[in-house]
Image (spheres, rainbow, N blue to C red):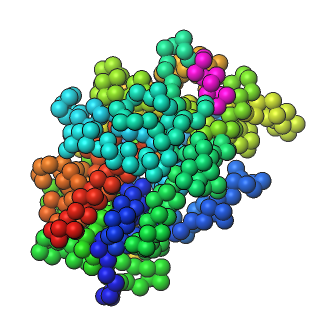
Amino acid sequence: MASTEAWDVVIVGAGAGGSVAAWTLAGLGVRTLVLDAGPQFDRLRDYRVDQADWELRSFPDKPGSKGRYTSRLDPLDPRWQALRSWSLNYGPQAPGNQRRFGEYQHVRGIGGSTLHFSAENHRLHPDAMRLKSLFGVAADWPFDYATLAPHYDAVERQLGTAGAESDRSRPRSGPFPLPAHAPSYASQKLMAATRALGVEWQANPVAIPSRPYQGRPSCVYCGQCNRGCMLGDKGSADLVFLAPALASGMCTVRPDTRAIRIEAEHGRIVRVVCRGSDNRDFALSPRAVVLACGALETPRLLLNSSASHSPQGLANESGLVGKNFMETVMTALAGLHPEPLGTMRGLPSDIVCWQHNAPDAIPGMVGGCRFVPMTSSADLAGPINHARRMLSGWGAELKATLRQTYGCAFALGAFGESLPHAGAFIDLDPHERDADGLPLARINAGHEATTPARLDFMRRRSLAMLDAFGIAEIKEQITTYDLFSASHVFGTCRMGGDPSTSVVDAFGRSHRWGNLFVADASLFPTSGGGESPSLTIGALARRGTLHLAELLARRDI
């Protein structure tokens, strides 16, 4: 099982964090190997939004590109019936009194979930990093916004983030790398209609070029980012970070390779035991290991790597591996506008409202939210789902109504804070195992006490906006109150300065195992008020691996 390969660093996971870590290390001349359990995707062969049946094709489900998980979810409180998910045509989406598991919307593969993300590129609100000291809840980050800001700058430059020069929602040292995209016609109409409500919109920062940038073309506004970008303009991690890492000659990437366990001795990691696509095991002994498997698979790998020196799981001296799980908190309301808006065109979420994003911006609770158009992300941009979910009737009548209303469907989304609490955590399923014989990660997802009220605020505010916009009848309401449907998950290997209350330090380094680092959203002490996390993951990965490179250069690990 031994391997003769010599690597300075092995990175497990090729998504937002692992790719930035590889790009950073390879750029500094560190010999780096990136492993991922999923496949390599080919944007021209796999993403077929150019085909007539594009709407029947979701993001491609290639062998190994989806993980398996189990769940244990809480019963629902009848006081919050208004938050239940339903469709006018299909009825309740979670019938009964139990929360239903929908989907953890992730991708295993080279590029990870950035392959199908909407490319929203958000910096965290500075106050969201100090919830404990400012508001007495959750935990503070072990550093402030200013510490992370230069890493935000560097990752944005590489991504070619497009944003408005007038954007003052976050402190910045300079303008965005590219100018903002112009809002779509539908978004312009929404902005005008909600002005009387005092709603303030601005261009949503996105990792999609508004003009050609570093060999990537500008966007063509097909709106199908979630199905994979054929043109190569969207800032997915494989294209923007792993490609230059590979070009440096200091990085190798291996798809379809599972990390089975991590072995440690005498205060350091000595082996990563892997299994290739041929189901043969081999071991790697790098100078350092970076885990970037995401907030479900990183704790699962650590918990599955228990040993006599770590009976509760590797790096779990605090007992917090898998704890403090935070999920997506979301509402999405959709209906038909009375005028043709061309909602099948444009970026999935081209504008954003940050007015309620600060931790104290929603009266009576700690934790904010944001609002965005999300017609494409709700998969309502095509005629098939438009007819299925927005219309009724049959035959010629249905066809006529479809012709009249296609492009009128509109969905408004809201994303909110997810506060850590004892009822939400990841552990190992005691019964279910994967093909390698390892226990699956089990998602235990109870709602934190203020979550229903936050969802209710998001829902009521969305209803007011849609009514002002001219959409009087809601045809579909989806919320994460009764449906577990997470695109972002966080917090299961919390970073901090105190080893008794955190898993890793401020650089993502294990408090006990000196050559073990984490570089994904499991680091987050708090989730933020609905910000998309990929930019923050990248900034954390860059900061942590710069520190790792310094330690390697000094031979301190």
> On screen, 33 above or below 179?
below
- Residue 132: quarter of image: top left
Q: Is residue 189 above or below residue 103?
A: above
Q: Quadrant of the C terminus?
A: bottom left
Could one spot residue 456 in this view of the protein? no
The residue that appears at 21% across and 28% down in the rendered structure is 135
| Image-based side of 552 in relation to 293, left or right | left
Identified at 20% across, 28% down, the residue is: 134
**Which residues are drawn in magenta?**
184-193
- Using the image as rendered, state which of residue 528 and residue 64 is in the foreground: 528
Q: Of 543 and 470, which appears nearest the observer?
A: 543
Q: Quadrant of residue 310?
A: bottom left
Q: Main secondary structure of the magenta part?
A: helix
Q: Residue furthest right?
A: 396
**Residue 496 horizontal/vertical position (percent):** 18, 48
Residue plotted at (40% across, 24% down): 356
Image position of 48 with respect to 127: above or below: below
| 21 and 534: which is toward the camera | 21
Say which residue appears at 51% left-offset and 13% top-offset: 197
Residue 378: name its quadrant. Answer: top right
Figure label count:
0
Left or right relative to 104: residue 444: left
Residue 185 falls inside the magenta stretch: yes
**Residue 508, horizontal then vertical, whole percent:** 24, 56
Q: Position of residue 55 (x, y in %)?
A: 70, 50
Quadrant containing the N terminus in the rendered view: bottom left
Q: Is residue 483 magenta?
A: no
| Residue 248 position within the rendered picture, expressed as x and y whole percent measured from the top left | 43, 69
Is residue 216 visible from the viewing direction of this image?
yes
